[in-house]
Image: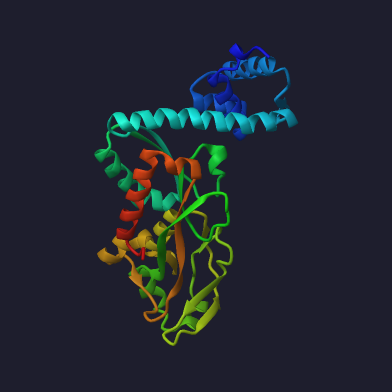
Amino acid sequence: MDRSDVTLDRMRTFVRVAERGNLTAVARELGTGQSTVTRHLRELEAAVGAPLINRTTRRVAMTEDGSRYYAHCVQILRLVEQAGEEIRDTRGAPSGTIRVSCTAALGVLHITRLLLAFQARYREIRIDLSLTDERIDLVKEGVDIAIRLGPLTDSSLKLHPLGASRRLLVAAPAYLAAHGRPEKPDDLAGHNVIRMSNVAGSETLVLVGPDGRTRSVPVTGDLRVDHGLAAREAFRAGRGIGPVHRWLVDDLLKSGELEPLLPGHALPPTPLNMLIVPERAKVARVRLLIDDLAREARGLPGIT
């Protein structure tokens, strides 16, 4: 092996191709051409003396040697990055890029504003924000922090609870004027309920009554959506009744465009968590954002 050909740039390219499984995506991410990505891989394989990537017409995958080499590359690149960050942290204001992934509607309505305020305080820090409701692989996608609603099971990541997101039933005054106001849970059976197609069990509403007892109420409706902002607009347009997170419609409740329903009955809250790649939690700028989001999230509507 010619060690002079094993460069950090080639290792970075290999690691991202191994994680993304797509040469075009990596080229776009690195801001270079696909031919450069291919050349980096070819030169690195020649330097180590073994094929690292199997290429097909649709995707690429690591060879057995590639999997072993990948683990070493990740460790080396993290040590190099950490060493540079420690030097920069001792010489002045924190700088560099933080990659954040966030549930889409929460990101649009609230988290983006918090990130902009954070950047106003730390001008040398760049934010790369991705809004998605999909449960992505943080390491594979190169994300430092993810903000997610709902239960989480990935034990390889550091979990930082932000609180619980309170939910409630809402409808527009125009809908209630046309279809009546439900007075008890059983009345929901006669209403058009807007449901989330990407939420398991949305055909049933679980309500906790004033006596603490839980009721499961089957519901139906002519509209299902897979995005919170679409549900918000449907409620606002008077299309139906449905459950929402308080932070999604707080402004519409205050303006009277939506009204809360079934006072005394509560919907179970949803956990709101921050997921962090453990190695990234040691980076000064990432620690700053973790602390900032943990503090500011408590002020969001309906987060307790």
- The C terminus lies in quadrant: bottom left
Image position, residue 76 (x, y; %): 55, 29
Q: Nearer the viewer, residue 21 or 284?
A: 284
| Residue 197 visible, this orientation | yes
Q: Is residue 123 above or below residue 192?
A: above
Q: 46 left or right of 78?
A: right
The image quarter in which residue 16 lies: top right
| Image vertical order of residue 267 relative to residue 26, above or below | below
Tell me what residue is drawn at x 43 percent, y 41 percent.
282
Above-or-below relation of 115 to 67: below
Q: Pinpoint residue 42: horizontal percent, then vertical percent.
A: 66, 16
Total marks placed = 0
Q: Is residue 100 visible?
A: no
Residue at 52% over, 26% down: 28
Q: In which quadrant is the N terminus drawn?
A: top right
Horizontally, residue 144 falls left or right of residue 67, namely: left
Instruction: Tell me residue 101's x, y (percent).
Output: 46, 44
Q: Coloring scheme of the render?
A: rainbow
- Position above or below: 76 against 274: above
Q: Residue furthest bottom?
A: 211
Quarter-of-image position of residue 40: top right
The residue located at (29%, 43%) in the rendering is: 118
**Residue 197: x %, y % from top left:** 56, 59
Q: Nearer the viewer, residue 156 or 109?
A: 156
